[in-house]
């Protein structure tokens, strides 16, 4: 079975399997959020079922296009409502935007006049409304300090907007169909639902800290059994396919690693040493598959082990983003990771160096301008949040060296 035939079946069976698994794991505990989650997954399954049925349908192409647009509109609304309910429920502004998106979206999906190009107008309405709602989610997470689950909501919202943009681009004004991105989004929503229903990352009253570790272990197990098993099955199906399918499988493998690292980072008392050790364990198979040798030089000292909290997670994310760049863009066969306390500088030093193709313009001006992609700019912003600085040294065919310095005074530490 080729990818075109396999995709609709995977897109149908994945949400149905997740619904069955969640119903089994939530016996006797039904909440409003569970109902929203189930309805959202059913909308994914409905679009996949339409995609499977359309080749044998007797409906004309225009009617099928309209039906697929309506199904996709309902799916988009389902995702948006689920995300809003994971944070705070609907507020008046959000209710107005969702109502506008539903009304205009359904009208434009089913009726041509008075727009000359209704598919473009329909896509624009959905993207604009979704972007406005994303901004309200950002504000809600920042104001309420929603913790790890709140940031997972923002990740899922950004992923949803990215999937929507990709789906509109693939459809090019025609019928909406299923995509591998939708399958991945289904699993991202599952991870978010698990985080919210298990209570991970929320503030707890004094005396209940011991439960955090148990919740984290339970969430990690659920992610492994639920999201992980589905992703692994999809990756296995794609590995034997075309070059594009193998590329998709590699991206899904990276997503699986990122999900596991997100769970690892949920422990509020984890040290930078334990988080980096987890990163090494998670990313080493990806590096081996890419034929990249990793040299690990992380100092095992008490001062480094005392770095905890947000500072430790920022350093983990810096390292993860740098390694992701090495995997995707460097063409290297060797990478070195160094992390230690530099006594002379009175700072933590983190360095990731590879022997790949390097950046096209390694000069300071070049790196400060167009050569810095979103990943490197994000790393600079993260280093700035830590109160440190990030330097990048690179030259064509001579590799890239990313080095972060964080003063000890800016690090959150815990006495050992």
Image: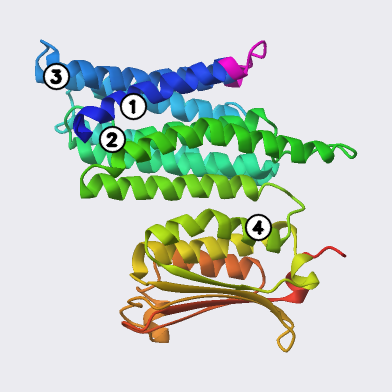
Q: Residues within 10 Å of mark 1 (few under 14, many from 20)?
A: many
Q: Residue at x 45, y 47 (%)?
A: 255
In front of the other: 332 or 178: 332
Nearer mark to the viewer, of 3 and 4? 4
Residue extent of the magenta highlight? 24-33
What SS does tag 4 mark? helix
* Residue linked to disc 4: 275
Q: Against 242, is 24 above or below?
A: above
Q: Earlier in the sequence, mark 3 or mark 4?
A: 3
Left or right of residue 269, residue 396 in this image: left
Circle 2 crowding by C-alpha within 10 Å: few under 14, some 14–19, many from 20: many
Classify mark 1: helix, strand or loop. helix
Q: Nearer the viewer, residue 46 or 129?
A: 46
Image location (x, y in percent) of residue 44: 37, 23
Give the Cα separation between the discs numbered 4 and 2. Answer: 41 Å
Which residue corresponds to the image point at 26% horizontal and 44% vertical from the top-left? 245
Which residue lies under the disc numbered 2?
123
How does the figure colour the protein chain or chains? rainbow
Front of the two marks 4 and 2: 4
Query: Residue 140's image quarter?
Result: top right
Percent from the top left, x then y, of residue 76? 39, 28
Examine the image and state in which quarter residue 102 appears. Answer: top left
Q: Which residue is mark 1?
A: 11
Q: Residue at x 42, y 18 (%)?
A: 16
Q: Earlier in the sequence, mark 4 or mark 1?
A: 1
**Which tag, 2 or 1, sits closer to the chain's start?**
1
Q: For the stretch drawn in magenta, what is the main secondary structure?
A: loop
Circle on res. 55: 3
Work out whether residue 338 or residue 196 is closer to the camera in this orientation and state it.
Answer: 338
């Amino acid at each position: 079975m080729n990818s075109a035939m396999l995709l609709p079946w995977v897109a149908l069976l994945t949400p149905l399997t997740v619904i069955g698994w969640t119903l089994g794991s939530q016996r006797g505990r039904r909440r409003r959020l569970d109902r929203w989650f189930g309805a959202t997954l059913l909308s994914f399954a409905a679009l996949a079922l339409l995609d499977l049925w359309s080749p044998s349908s007797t409906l004309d192409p225009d009617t099928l296009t309209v039906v697929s647009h309506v199904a996709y509109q309902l799916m988009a609304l389902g995702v948006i409502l689920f995300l809003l309910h994971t944070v705070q429920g609907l507020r008046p502004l959000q209710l107005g935007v969702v109502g506008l998106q539903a009304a205009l979206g359904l009208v434009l999906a089913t009726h041509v006049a008075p727009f000359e190009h209704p598919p473009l107008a329909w896509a624009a309405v959905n993207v604009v409304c979704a972007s406005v709602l994303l901004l309200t989610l950002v504000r809600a997470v920042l104001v309420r300090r929603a913790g790890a689950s709140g940031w997972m909501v923002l990740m899922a919202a950004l992923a949803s907007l990215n999937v929507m943009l990709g789906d509109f681009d693939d459809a090019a004004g025609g019928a909406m169909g299923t995509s591998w991105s939708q399958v991945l989004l289904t699993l991202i929503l599952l991870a978010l639902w698990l985080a919210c229903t298990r209570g991970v990352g929320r503030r707890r009253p004094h005396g209940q800290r011991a439960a955090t570790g148990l919740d984290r272990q339970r969430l990690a197990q659920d992610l492994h059994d639920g999201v992980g098993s589905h992703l692994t099955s999809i990756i296995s199906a794609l590995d034997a396919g075309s070059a594009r399918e193998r590329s998709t499988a590699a991206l899904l493998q990276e997503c699986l690693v990122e999900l596991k690292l997100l769970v690892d980072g949920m422990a509020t008392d984890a040290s930078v040493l334990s988080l980096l050790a987890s990163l090494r364990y998670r990313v080493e198979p990806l590096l081996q598959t890419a034929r990249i040798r990793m040299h690990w030089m992380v100092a095992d000292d008490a001062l480094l082990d005392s770095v905890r909290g947000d500072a430790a997670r920022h350093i983990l994310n810096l390292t993860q983003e740098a390694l992701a760049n090495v995997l995707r863009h460097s063409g290297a066969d060797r990478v070195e990771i160094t992390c230690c306390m530099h006594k002379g500088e009175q700072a933590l030093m983190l360095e990731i160096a590879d022997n790949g193709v390097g950046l096209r313009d390694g000069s300071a001006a070049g790196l400060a301008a167009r050569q810095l992609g979103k990943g490197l700019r994000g790393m600079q912003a993260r280093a700035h949040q830590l109160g440190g600085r990030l330097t990048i040294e690179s030259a064509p065919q001579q590799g890239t060296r990313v080095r972060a310095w964080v003063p000890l005074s800016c690090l959150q530490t815990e006495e050992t």
